[in-house]
Amino acid sequence: MNAINEVKMLAAKKGITLTSIAKYLSENSDKKYTLDGLSKKLRAGTIKYSEMKLIAEALGCELIFKEKE
């Protein structure tokens, strides 16, 4: 599954829109995010790790690396 589908799935589960995630990113970073710009980054796979951490925060999640079992 790609990043945009993962984010959309988690957002839908929590009742959060991508627009509100873009707003959260803008408020908690030094960059301006729009729905279109965020969607393009997620689709193209050009999203930065720091941006994914903020998206996880917006979703009430944490981004972790876990060893495979």
Image (cartoon, helix red, strand yellow):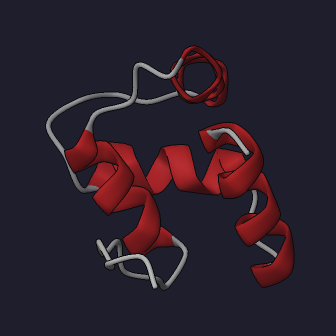
Q: Quadrant of residue 53?
A: bottom left
Q: Where is residue 32 drawn, in percent x and y?
A: 34, 28
Q: Is residue 14 above or below residue 8?
A: below
Give the residue at x 65% y 26%.
39
User: Can you name the residue that lies furthest to the left here?
Assistant: 30
- Residue at far front of view: 69
Can you say whether 46 is above or below 8 in the image? above
Q: Residue at x 24, y 56 (%)?
A: 28
* Most foreground residue, 9 or 23: 9
Residue 61 lies left or right of residue 36; in this view the side is: left
Please give the name of the residue rendered at 41% of the width and 19% of the height, measured from the top-left corner. 46
Is 44 left, or right, of 39 in this rendering?
Answer: left
Residue 24: name its quadrant.
Answer: bottom left
Q: Nearer the viewer, residue 9 or 60?
A: 9
Quadrant where the N terminus lies?
A: top right
Indicate the position of residue 43 as horizontal and vertical percent values: 65, 22
The residue nearer to you, when weighing 12 against 23, is 12
At a point 66% along the width and 55% down the height, the residue shown is 7
**Residue 65 placement (x, y as % from top left):** 29, 71
